[in-house]
Image: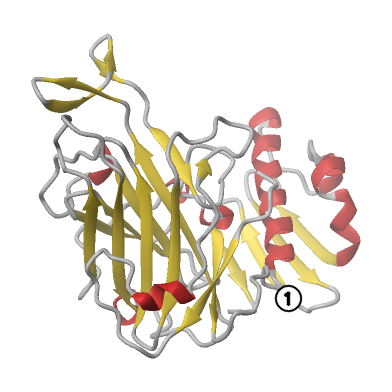
C-alpha cells in the first residue's frame, strides 16, 4: 500500500459537451488515463480487457468519458439504485473535501442504470451507505459498439459518458465548484464477472452453485480488495492548461499519518493496545524512519492503550494533519 497514487490533470473547457456516450471533438483535448490494473497492484494479473478514461470540467460540471473494451457486453439490472456491481459495471468515487470524511460513489452498467450513494465516512469507521441520496441533474449515456445481451457476435467496447454537477456534490459546507489548481480525491473501478452462455443468454460462471469472485480493475491501485479507502485513491487536479499532473504538496504528510495509523492497528491487533512510541511499530524502519525528521510528531495514547491521537506538523510547509484510531482526522489546508 505504499505506491504513490496517480494524478489526472483535467482541463477546463468553455464549450458545451453533448452527453451521448460518444467522443465528441472537444474530448480530443483531454489525455487518456493510464490503463486500469488489478485493485491490489501491478504484481497481480494484468486485466483481460482495456479500461481507460478522460476528464474535463467547466464552471458547472465534471465530465467523464470512459471506454471499456469488452467482447461480450451484457447487463441485467434496470432499476435505479439496484446493486449495480452485480452486473459488469463502471464506478466513480469522488471525495471533494480533504478535511472531511464524506465522499460519493456512482455506478453504471451497460444499460445505463445508475446506482449513486453518499458515504458519511468509510465502512471500516462505522459509515453506512446513504442510497437515498442522488446526484441531482446527473447526465449519463452509454454507447455500445456491438450488441447488448447477444452472445451470437463479438462486441468491441462500451463507452460511458457523464456530466456530474458540482452543485450536487455540495454537502456539509462542501465546495460549490472547484477553483483552478484545486485537488480532489478520485478513483475509478471496473467490476468484471466471468460468464457462461446458455440458450443465447449470459450468466455468471459458477462453481458449486456460487458465482466465481469478480475481477476488480482500477485506475489508481489500492493495495487491498476494498475501494473504500479514500486515502489510497488518486487525485483529480483541476487545470486551466496542459500542465503535467503532479501530486499535491500535502500528499507527503497524509501518507505519513495514514502509515502510522495502519501500523498502529497492526500493533493493537498483536499486542491488544496502541503504543505511544512509533519506533515500536512493526514496519517503522521500512515505512516511517526515513521521514520522521520532517515532522513534529505528537502522539498521545490513553492510559489503557485503547485510544490514540496523532498530530503531525510538516516542519517545512506548515501543514498539520491529525488523526485518531477511529479514523477521525483534521487538516489545516483544503
Local secondary structure at mark 1: loop
Q: Quadrant of the C terminus?
A: bottom right
Q: Is residue 30 above or below residue 257?
A: below
Q: x, y (%) of residue 108?
A: 26, 53
Q: Residue at x 39, y 90 (%)?
A: 14
Q: Is residue 93 above or below residue 192?
A: below
Q: Is residue 171 above or below residue 161?
A: below
Q: Residue at x 42, y 49 (%)?
A: 189
Q: x, y (%) of residue 4?
A: 68, 54
Q: x, y (%) of residue 154?
A: 25, 35
Q: Is residue 8 above or below residue 170?
A: above
**Dot 1 alpha-carbon crowd within 10 angstroms: few under 14, some 14 to 19, many 20 or more:** some
Left or right of 297, for residue 7: left
Left or right of 138, for residue 319: right
Q: Residue at x 80, y 71 (%)?
A: 314
User: Dividing the picture into quarters, in which one does residue 23 lie?
Assistant: bottom left
Q: Observer-nearest residue: 55 or 82? A: 55
User: Dividing the picture into quarters, in which one does residue 224 lie?
Assistant: top right
User: Dividing the picture into quarters, in which one does residue 197 lie?
Assistant: top left
Q: Observer-nearest residue: 24 or 304? A: 24
Q: Residue at x 8, y 20 (%)?
A: 199
Left or right of 118, for residue 250: right
Can residue 275 be seen? yes
Q: Quadrant of the N terminus?
A: top right
Q: Observer-nearest residue: 62 or 48? A: 48
Left or right of 1, for residue 256: right
Q: Which residue is mark 1?
A: 319
Q: Looking at the image, how many numbered discs can be counted on the residues?
A: 1
Return the residue found at the far front: 153
Colouring mode (rainbow / by chain / secondary structure / one colour): secondary structure
Return the residue found at the far top: 208
Amino acid at each position: 500500500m505504499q505506491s504513490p497514487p496517480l494524478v489526472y490533470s483535467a482541463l477546463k473547457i468553455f464549450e458545451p459537451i453533448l452527453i451521448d456516450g460518444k467522443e465528441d471533438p472537444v474530448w480530443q483535448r483531454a489525455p487518456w488515463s493510464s490503463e486500469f490494473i488489478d485493485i491490489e497492484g501491478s504484481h497481480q494479473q494484468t486485466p483481460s480487457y482495456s479500461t481507460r478514461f478522460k476528464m474535463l470540467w467547466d464552471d458547472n460540471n465534471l465530465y467523464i468519458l470512459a471506454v471499456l473494451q469488452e467482447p461480450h457486453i451484457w447487463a441485467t439490472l434496470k432499476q435505479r439504485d439496484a446493486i449495480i456491481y452485480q452486473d459488469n459495471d463502471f464506478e466513480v468515487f469522488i471525495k471533494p473535501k480533504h478535511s472531511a470524511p464524506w465522499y460519493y460513489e456512482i455506478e453504471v452498467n451497460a444499460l445505463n442504470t445508475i446506482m449513486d450513494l453518499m458515504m458519511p465516512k468509510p465502512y471500516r469507521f462505522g459509515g453506512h451507505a446513504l442510497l437515498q441520496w442522488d446526484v441531482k441533474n446527473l447526465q449519463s449515456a452509454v454507447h455500445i459498439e456491438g450488441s447488448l445481451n447477444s452472445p451470437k457476435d463479438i462486441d468491441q467496447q462500451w463507452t460511458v459518458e457523464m456530466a456530474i454537477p458540482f452543485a450536487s456534490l455540495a454537502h456539509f459546507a462542501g465546495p460549490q465548484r472547484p477553483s483552478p489548481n484545486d485537488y480532489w480525491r478520485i478513483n475509478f473501478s471496473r467490476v468484471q464477472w466471468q460468464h457462461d452462455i446458455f440458450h443465447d443468454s449470459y450468466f455468471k460462471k459458477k462453481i458449486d452453485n456460487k458465482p466465481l469472485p469478480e475481477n476488480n480493475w482500477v485506475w489508481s491501485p489500492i493495495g487491498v480488495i476494498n475501494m473504500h479507502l479514500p486515502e489510497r485513491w488518486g487525485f483529480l487536479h483541476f487545470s486551466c492548461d496542459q500542465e503535467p499532473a503532479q501530486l499535491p504538496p500535502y500528499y507527503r504528510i497524509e501518507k505519513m499519518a495514514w502509515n502510522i495509523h495502519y501500523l498502529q492497528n497492526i500493533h493493537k491487533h498483536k499486542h491488544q493496545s496502541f503504543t505511544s512510541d512509533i519506533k515500536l511499530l512493526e514496519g517503522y524502519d521500512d515505512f516511517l524512519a526515513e521521514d520522521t525528521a520532517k515532522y513534529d510528531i505528537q502522539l498521545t495514547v490513553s492510559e489503557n492503550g485503547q485510544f490514540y491521537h496523532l498530530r503531525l506538523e510538516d516542519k517545512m510547509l506548515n501543514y498539520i494533519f491529525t488523526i485518531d484510531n477511529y479514523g477521525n482526522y483534521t487538516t489545516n489546508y483544503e
